[in-house]
Amino acid sequence: MNNTVTITMVLLALAGLSACGADTNGGSKAASPVPGLVEEVLTQEQQAALTPDEVIRLLQKGNERFVTDDLTARDHSEQVRKSTYAQFPKAIVLSCVDSRVPVEDVFDRGIGDIFVARVAGNFVNEDILGSMEFACKVSGSKLILVLGHEHCGAVKAAVDDVKLGNITAMLQKIRPAVESVEYAGDRSSKNAEFVHMACQSNVRRTVEQIRQNSPILKEMEERGEIKIAGAVYDMDDGSVSWLE
């Protein structure tokens, strides 16, 4: 095969590839826009206009979308660029470290929407309290949400009073919530009913610990500037149940 034939075949192949990317009118195909694609991030003005109750409703609606697999389409690259130098999240969520609880997805939130603090068993300590005070007093968040979850390994370990390295001291933060549960039946991790009650007790106790150990946050809540709430994530269907 001579060089002229080879070059001709290459040009024909390239022409064929170009045709694959062209529409019937001879123009190049453009990527179809994604309906409702979110590119913006929350501004300080938008954050300031929110009330704690509105933030709760936004998280509840977001969780409904998560459960029905109707998550909002977001341009994360654009949101990253637009949140580089400032952030004005709606809320701070204290969650367990459990990998099965993807907090932002659970509430259908994007970049810059919420602060997330994590520790096994979602209890509160000095460092997390400081993070919450930063989120609310400094950065303007309107809600503190303590999010427990069903089938929590940390709660089960606290129920059974496990002793293992640094886990021992960690579980002692959860034990008071377990011990405060009034229950006459089997108080072991094999009893799903008792573990569920311990999980709820731990969330409620953590909410009260925040109020007791942070005068800043307690005062903000009393003034109506923020709300401190608790909820439990259901591993079976992805729904979030809010506690009183």
Image: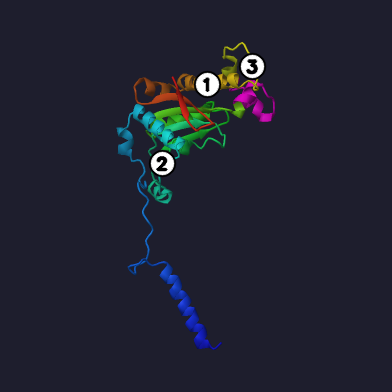
Neighbours of disc 2 within 10 Å: few (<14), some (14-19), many (20+): many
**Which residues make up the magenta segment?**
155-175
Q: Which mark is residue 112?
A: 2
Q: Which mark is residue 1?
A: none
Question: Which mark's residue is nearer the viewer, 3 or 2?
Answer: 3
Q: Secondary structure at mark 3?
A: loop
The residue beneath circle 3 is 187
Query: Marks 2 and 3: in contact by CB < 8 Å?
Result: no
| Residue 163 x %, y % | 69, 25
- Which of the two residues, 117 or 17, is positioned nearer the viewer here? 17
Query: Marks 2 and 1: in contact by CB < 8 Å?
Result: no
Residue drawn at x 55%, y 36% is 100
The quadrant holding residue 164 is top right
Q: For residue 193: magenta?
A: no
Residue drawn at x 61%, y 29% is 153
- Which of the two residues, 22 or 203, is positioned nearer the viewer here? 22
User: What's the amino acid at mark 1?
Assistant: Gln
Residue 37 drawn above or below residue 215: below
Residue drawn at x 41%, y 35% is 62
The residue beneath circle 1 is 200
| Residue 160 x %, y % | 66, 21
